[in-house]
Image (cartoon, rainbow, N blue to C red):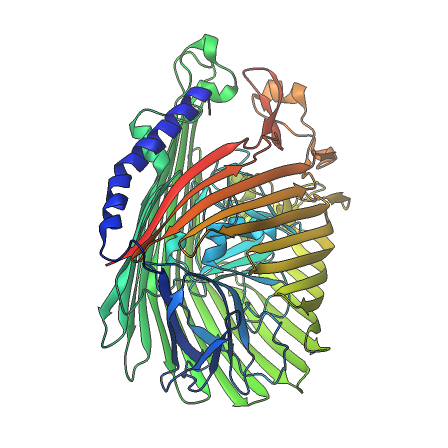
Amino acid sequence: MTVFELLLYFLAMISLLRFCFPVFILSLYFPGTAFAQQESSLRGVVTDAENQQPLAGATVLLMNTGRGTQTDESGSYKFGRLPVGRYVLRVSFLGYQPVVLPEILLESGKEQVVNLSLMPSKIELDEATVSMGKPDFYNSAEAITVEQTLRYAATYHDPARVATSFPGVAAANDQANGLVVRGNSPNGMQWRLEGVEIVNPNHHSNAGTFSDRATQTGGGVNILSTQMLGTSYFLSGAFPAGYGNVLSGVMDMSFRSGNDERHEFTAQAGLIGIDLAAEGPLSRKSGSSYLFNYRYSFTGLLGAMDVNFGGERIDFQDLSFKVKIPTRKMGEFGLFAMGGLSSNIFTGERDSTLRETQKDLLDITFRNRMGAGGVTHNISLGKRTGLRSVLVFSGLAGSRAAESYADAIPGRPVYEQDRLEKSRLSFSGILTHRLNPSHRLKAGLYLTRQHDGIEVNGSRGSLAGNLFQPFASWQWNINSRLTTEAGLHYLGYTMNHTGSLEPRASARLQVSKRQSVSFSYGLHSQTQLPQVYLGGAATADNLHLGLTRAHHFVAGYQRYFRGNTSLKVEAYVQQLLDVPVGRYASSFSALNLVESEVRLALKNGGTGRNRGIEATFQKYLTDGYYVLVSGAVYDSRYAGSDGVWRDTRFNGGHTLSFTGGKEFYRSNRSTWGVHARVLWLGGFRDTPIDAAASSVAGTTVYRQDMAYTIRMKDYFRPDLRIYWKKNKTRYNRMLALDIQNVSGTENEAFSYYDVYLKRIISQNQLGLIPILSYRWEFRL
């Protein structure tokens, strides 16, 4: 972004805020706002996590105030007229594992609704123990709350970017949220919505890629606005039996339900976009509610003003909603949908004296459409049994066209046309049954009809098939200290009749009320990328390729301290098998793929190995401050069909991150927050480029015999977020400034041969980016 474009950006932001400000001023004249103490309320429902039955008589305590209550016959609790601020909520019930939520934020104009599900358990925990993850995650799992995405620096309100604060997790590129988890390619990751795998739910899926083509799992911005999300869960290894078709990590997202008692609204303006949300009751008697959000990119508004970013017009918009419909006898239904459109349009430089790189020789248009919708159903089949069913359709269509204009490349015009289409129709049914207080059975089935189609420069291919994934698990609470779980998962793909039976097992020993050790194992598998199955004429036989598999072993230790503070250490080994590699001696391995085409005949003959140690020290936001320090030392290697063990593309060797912040309370109406995040990652690997061969070929040609022998410089990026919040009786507002890469560090991204400059160019990642935003939450 040039200085002129940056100035226009700030002027446009100021104009937008000036337009909105009179609306905010009008709210100052609401009756009684001038001197009233700012208050809010906290309420919710406590249920059994397995059968959705309400838990009457559960103890609900606000630990930092001493106030407490018990749930009524419907499992409901409520704290009214609470001063705005932060609270620590603890819920307990005899025979169940207690849950502690340490970062509950109450603000005026927004009622906080916290519904909790407790898991039957004999485990006895100290009051200092913080339990935010799902009960059946013994290792390698983190909860990501909406409040964290709004508070952490430089997250773009995206849970995937929050995950980069966790150990062993790195973004593949600053421009996108594709995640490298424990040295695995971002393609090994899976996105879930309401417990079901969906297609890539991100705008601008080509952001930050080597070839400017779409990826399978990443993008610039999540299509699902954080206004719509409940707590998300990020898993990085040894997954429970209910997870399949994934090798590296899972981002498990779900919609929250709208407020079923009163109407509330949110408006936000910033670089991410103009964000408008509404929620409220459809029927207070039945408890039905709605939740709605629309967002339009601010960069799109700038594009309409002929302001672009490096010659590129970037645009996106999205819409999402959820309707909750509880019934007396038929359980609770949920209807939901999300959809988004995005585009990047780059216009080459017609003036030959102003051309800087080969990209200036091209006009490039990238468009992406994605949508998902479905229905959920939860019903209790008795005091010990619950059934959850989900039906979801998701699909996307992306296209990229690149064309050189008249005199750009004399005698060698360029025209590239790429298309990507994906669709998934998925059904899941999961039955949970508690035999007695010590034994629980969980069984389910995932059925998916999927279609993939790709086109590369006129070469088209498509494939379709069914994924069949039954699973079952048995949890045994042996005594008050030891809990075990064993399960089986099967993944079958009818397109080429391949399958894998996968055992899973885990155990957790509560050494004391504040200390635990755990162990998890799982065999996991994943289908191949469309470009692996359908890479071109030379790869027609690749349709026969089987699943890639991986053994995951994880051992963990966790210690809780007073003050909502904990230490977690994990050691892991991942052994990958049946990886697609060249049919003949080659350094190629599918483990290194991002978005590239595949033009080789392949076989399932490759292997890989990831191993490392991770540590996390965390203090949740209590007493006005929080700290999250995480680090990992890891090694990621692979062997191709030539039998040589090499570093993978993503073998950075280490990750280290600091995330923390402090809030300053001037009164119960005004708060200042200063938050920072610092990332220091080992540099990824690159392959030497043959400049002479690239010049002849007119494209980048790599020295495949020296694959990934170049280690790029370490990645370093500090981010800063400063905000000011103000609470009034019926609304609250927040003005925030995010500065990504506040040091302006030029981190390496990749290298390529530039046919215009006739030399090798090193491409850097994003520099300093200021993001100003204004957020307003209010009720009628």
| Whole-percent x, y for residue 375 in the image | 33, 67
Residue at the front extreme of this rendering: 35
Q: Residue furthest top?
A: 353
Q: Is residue 458 above or below residue 372?
A: above
Q: Position of residue 613 (x, y in %)?
A: 74, 56
Front residue of this view, candidates 241 and 134: 134
Image spot of residue 486 (x, y percent):
63, 78
Left or right: residue 154 compared with residue 254? right
Q: Give residue 455's position: percent from left, percent from top.
A: 43, 39
Q: Residue at x 64, y 77 (%)?
A: 126
Give the left or right position of residue 28, taking residue 687 as reference: left
| In the image, residue 89 above or below residue 574 | below
Does the rendering let one see residue 308?
yes
| Image quarter in which the C terminus is found | bottom left
Look at the picture and state if 733 lies above or below 327. Answer: above
Asked whether, in this view, residue 452 is left or right of residue 717, the answer is: left
- Total residue callouts: 0
- Compared to 140, does 269 lie above or below? above
The single residue placed furthest to the bottom in the displayed view is 436
Asked whether residue 410 appears in the rendered view, the answer is no
Closer to the camera in the image, 569 or 664: 664
Rendering quarter of residue 193: bottom left
Which residue: 22% across, 77% down?
A: 285
Residue at 69%, 67% in the rendered image: 558
Where residue 17 sits, quadrant-wise, is top left
